[in-house]
Amino acid sequence: MIKIVIGGQLEKRSLYDAIKQKHLKCIQIIETDDELESIYLLQSGEVDYYIGVCMTGSGGALGLVSSILGNDITFTVSSPVKISDKSEVIRQLELGKRAFGFCSFSLPHSIDLFLVSLDEYLGHINA
């Protein structure tokens, strides 16, 4: 079971709903209203991944994570000018990235992309 905590500054309910609609039994979503608690859950290993949404995909989504845990674990999946492709997301997972940011404008597509990439990545490491 993969545990994902939802953080960031915007669209927490939309993000939660988008993931739940996929009916992925292998993902448990952890909700919290406290951004610091979300980061603590990631830092302590109680969750596997952190995902957040803001207007840019990095500032409000990943800013606090970056300042506390460092930039080396964060990756912006989508920004107002770019949406990463599946191979890039998988590569970032392989590099050990654990916190992912999404731009609110591209949320439905980019969260689907992330979930497909995560599924493929997990298939590779569990094979």
Image (cartoon, rainbow, N blue to C red):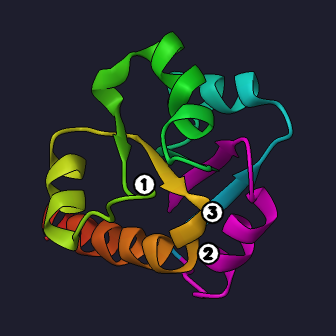
Labels 3 and 1: the sequence-earlier one: 3
Residue matched to label 3: 28
Start-end of magenta stretch: 1-25
Tell me where residue 31 appears, x and y as whole percent.
78, 50
Determine the residue positioned at 56% across, 53% down: 3
Q: Quadrant of residue 121?
A: bottom left
Q: Residues within 10 Å of mark 2 (few under 14, many from 20)?
A: some
For mark 1, what is the residue?
Answer: 79
Q: Which mark's residue is nearer the viewer, 2 or 3?
A: 2
User: Which amino acid type corresponds to the residue marked 1 in the rendered image?
Assistant: Ser
- Labels 1 and 2: the sequence-earlier one: 2
**Labels 2 and 3 touching (C-beta < 8 A):** no
Please state which amino acid type lies under the numbered disc 3: Gln
Q: Nearer the viewer, residue 27 or 34?
A: 34
Q: Nearer the viewer, residue 1 or 77?
A: 77
Q: Which residue is mark 2?
A: 19
Q: Name the image quarter holding the C terminus.
A: bottom left
Q: Residue furthest front?
A: 81
* Image coordinates for residue 49, horizontal then vertical, percent: 48, 46
Q: Whole-Å distance between the Cαs marked 1 and 2?
A: 19 Å
* Residue at the far right in the pictured view: 33
Q: Secondary structure at mark 2?
A: helix
Q: Position of residue 118 (x, y in %)?
A: 33, 66
Does the CB distance between marks 1 and 2 fall below 8 Å?
A: no
Q: Which of labels 1 and 2 is toward the front?
A: 1
| Position in image of residue 59 (x %, y %) | 55, 33
* Position of residue 96 in the picture relative to residue 24 (left or right): left
Q: Is residue 89 above or below residue 107?
A: above
Where residue 23 sits, quadrant-wise, is bottom right
Residue occupying image coordinates x 66% and y 87%? 21
Residue at 59% over, 21% down: 64
